[in-house]
Image (spheres, rainbow, N blue to C red):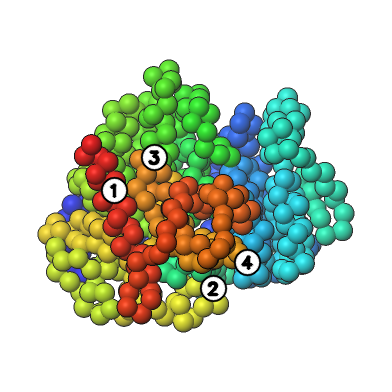
Amino acid sequence: MSSKIWLKHYPAEIPHTLEYEEIPVQTFLTRAYEKNPKKCAIHFMGRELDYQELYESALKFANYLRFLGVEKGDRVAIMLPNCPQAVIAYYGILYAGGIVVQTNPLYTERELEYQMQDSEAKVILALDILYPRIMKVIHRTQIENVIITGIKDYLPFPKNLVYPFIQKKQYGFSVKVEHRGSTHLFTEIMKVEKPKPIDVPFNFEEDLALLQYTGGTTGVPKGVMLTHKNLIANTMMCDAWLYKCEEGKEIILGLLPFFHVYGMTTVLILSVMKSNKMVLLPKFEVEQVLKTIDKQKPTLFPGAPTMYIGLLNHPDLSKYDLSSINACISGSAPLPVEVQEKFEEITGGKLVEGYGLTETSPVTHANFIWGKRVVGSIGVPWPDTEAVIMKPGENEILSPGEVGEIAIRGPQVMKGYWKRPEETAKVFADGWFLTGDLGYMDEEGYFYVVDRKKDVIIAGGFNIYPREVEEVLYEHEAVQECVVVGVPDPYRGETVKAFIVLKEGKTVTEDELNKYCRNNLAAYKVPRIYEFRDSLPKTAVGKILRRTLIDEEKQKAKELQAK
């Protein structure tokens, strides 16, 4: 048993345990509408939606999904950046009794096809510019209907008229889609008057709200099954951690993408649960973010280290007022101390590091925002969350200071991996979820991550699984052997490097490999560095020693720093 020695550090305002209402996630939106119908729910590039419009739009979307044949438990995919349609659809799918499948808009055809096949999604909602990509793979999936929207659909006048021209210049093409057959326009769906609530039977413990794809320990993307209970619990824990924040008075900056579970919990659900306003931006552009903070005065800014680094390094930073920011929890990658200190100095707010995984909805640990925090530590477990350090490969709980695998138990831990009972069984031991991360707990109950058991590369807050990149490289006719590792990067935290051994008599340039990878992988997964070698280090049985290459790169980085 874990002794929860960290509880002694809890401020009086944070309860050790919480009571979770057995309600579906979408009930938060129903309540926000009933209590604050005219309060601003979303600000998007000058356009605002109040809670009444958000609620009614979500119901319209839900009713339309039912009209298309979506039933309880059916999967519906959302392939959008952060925009009002993403929020409307998320709650609409849940109102219809469906399960949300968040899909990264950067996915290539290959990645999209795999996720749609695996999730067996019946409907997909996507941006207009993604329509051609979807149509190329749709016949190999179970998608029956495609709903299309555009950024312009929720822009104020005259931005809505200008945007299509900007988009055409940016992407080199424009897409015209008609509302007919199995293709539907979001704008047409929103024309329905007086949508009706839908009564769907509900089981708090068992019903899935979300399939969130992750590479897990094997590198093969798996759907993490998150229930309504998982998401409700983690959002309520987050609310307890942010105890100084007031209902209906906070403004949350929605920069973290909703297709990342951290952005979904801390912005998409928490904002609605507390009747707060979310300020959405479709992508991270430093100057646009600085202008938005200056004008919209967000009080909460959940983010990733690369975001804070990007803002701090902007040459015109001093021209913008960031003093509205009161609290930030940084996730998805280690937070450098100098970034934390400089950000707090400039904003006057608090920036602390947290820790979690897709499989834990996602947060399990954080430093206290207004309490004791320890530099270099991921903090302490959240309410109702137990954590221990286990001896890898054995179910033995280690003592403080001993390095082992971080294991978690709590109401935010996933139900399992979609259609993969064997994979699920591998990551649970005696009811503990095994994170795959190596770390230790100190005598005070603060936790530290020292390394990753799995080889995931975290670049700019995105999880990149080497095996996925390697599989693409191995399909190139000139590549005999390859291994992909994360190498230190001052901005992204890590960046992707590929070591390549070419087939005898074959040649390929770095540019050619880069172009090939860009056609088969999302941009953030594409290697930034290629190194051609005659051979790769291997074990006696021929297994490539990835760790040797990682250690080489770390040594090179140290030597460069020393200079």
Give the residue drawn at x 45%, y 77%: 423
| Quadrant including the C terminus | top left
**SS under mark 4:** helix
Q: Amino acid at mark 3?
A: Tyr
Q: Pointer 1: what residue?
A: 556
Q: Earlier in the sequence, mark 1 or mark 2?
A: 2
Looking at the image, is mark 1 or mark 3 nearer the viewer? 1
Whole-number angstrom distance, CA of label 3 to CA of label 2? 34 Å
Label 1 with label 2: CB-CB less than 8 Å:
no
Whole-number angstrom distance, CA of label 4 to CA of label 1? 37 Å
Give the residue drawn at x 32%, y 32%: 343
Whole-number angstrom distance, CA of label 3 to CA of label 4? 30 Å
Q: Earlier in the sequence, mark 4 or mark 1?
A: 4
**Which of 283/3 is in front?**
283
Q: Pointer 2: what residue?
A: 418
The disc label shown at residue 114, or none: 4
Give the residue drawn at x 54%, y 73%: 418
Q: Earlier in the sequence, mark 3 or mark 4?
A: 4
Q: Dot 1, how many residues are within 10 Å of its Cα: few (below 14), some (14-19), or many (20+)?
A: some
The disc label shown at residue 491, or none: 3
Q: Amino acid at mark 1?
A: Lys
- Can see residue 9? yes
Looking at the image, is mark 3 or mark 2 nearer the viewer? 3
**SS under mark 2:** loop
